[in-house]
Structures are given as structure tokens and as C-alpha cells.
Image: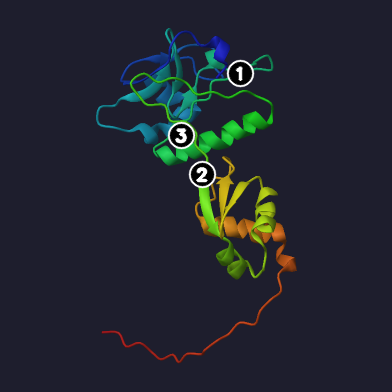
Amino acid sequence: HDLSKIRGNLVYRAARNGSIVPLGESSEKSFSDVIKSNEKGIEYANTIENKEQLVPFLADSDKTISLIPIINSELTRISSNTNALLVDITGMSKSIVGDATKILACSFIDQGASVGLCNIEGSKIERIEKKHIKVSIKKANTLVGTSKEGREMAGLLEKFGYSTAIYGSSIKAEVPLYRTDVMSDIDVIEDIGIAYGYENIKPKPITWGGCKGSEYELA
């Protein structure tokens, strides 16, 4: 949304009745009309089905700016003159919404934007925290097939945007915010392997002890 077109505070609500000027249209429509006749309303109507027939929406002090998750309002449409955005991210999973927020925030920051969080009344605002993962240097060398010292291994991670610190026989890796795919030390070790170059890893023969198979009789 174009932040300059928003008035007053924002509020999330759900109601049977209400109106919005749908994106791409010039006149106000009722919530039910949007759901029945708008292309996006028809496509996503099933996502808000409920016994009470309530429609979730986001509004400022004088208008509805979004029917969630169907369509935004034409009144807050962004243009080439927009220099401040309100980014609203909604979803059923708090962790997925958080990951999407991190990726978008990093993308905007990379483009030179300043990013901030909105204050929400009655809720604790959680800062976007960076993830720290401890990686055993011995384990990394064993799995990747290398014999790197800690500092050299940390240098490989830094190529991928990690911040690192060495604590004895382990590396503490600070994961870049946008790397929501990194969940454990195995993911960090995989990045070490990629940074080192798979083509530089010397192959080892596969040892196979052998086994004997037979038909399994169904009861």
C-alpha cells in the first residue's frame, strides 16, 4: 500500500457487511459483491468460508484498504511516485509469515530502503532476530571430506553472508536473515561444501557390506 494514502491507525476486523474500492476498479462495492463478482473474490472466496459469514479486512480511520486475503484497495494503489510503503503480510502460520517478512525486509534494505515495524496495540512486538547455529569443525570436515582449520572454514561461510566466531572446536554461525532455508548445522555444513566446491572434494569408494533379500509373505 502507498503509505501516504493511509489515514490514522490501522485495524484488523471481521464483519458481514462493509465496502471497499477493489484494486483496478473505480467504485465502491460491498464485501459480498466483491466475493461474488470480482475475479479475485471468486477465486479466493473459499479461503474465508465460515459459519458466521464474516469477512476479514484491514482498514484505516476512514476506509477499507484490504479484504484479506482477497484483494487490496484501489485507494492505496502504489505508483511511480510512491516513496513509502506499508507492507501487510498475513497468513495461517506465524513462522511462515515471519520468514516472508525477513525475506522482503532484506530485499528492500538491499535496494537502499529503510525498514521498520508497526506498533500493535495489545501485542508484544517481536524483533526480527538472527539465527545462530553451532557447527562442529570435526563434523563438518568428516561430512564434507575436508581437513580445514576453523578459520579457513569460517572464511568459506563468510562467502555466503554468514557472520562467524570460533569457539574452541566449533564455529558459531550467524545465519543471514533471508536464508530461511537454513534450519540446522547440516544446512550450514552443506554451505561449507558448496563454498569449498564439490569439484574439489576427492571422492571415496563406497563400502558395501552386502545383504540378502527374500519374498515377504503377506498375512
Q: Is residue 185 left or right of residue 13?
A: right
- Please tell me which of labels 2 and 1 falls first in the chain: 1
**Residue at image mark 2:** 131
C-alpha distance separating marks 2 and 1: 33 Å
Give the secondary structure at mark 1: loop
Give the secondary structure at mark 2: strand
C-alpha distance separating marks 3 and 2: 37 Å
Find residue 141 and report its horizontal and vertical position in percent: 62, 67
- For badge 1, the amino acid type reads Ile
217 or 112, nearer to the observer: 112
C-alpha distance separating marks 3 and 1: 23 Å
Label at residue 28? none
**Looking at the picture, does residue 84 appear above or below residue 101?**
above
Label at residue 43? 3
Find residue 3 and report its horizontal and vertical position in percent: 55, 15
Label at residue 78? 1
Q: Is residue 192 left or right of residue 6?
A: right
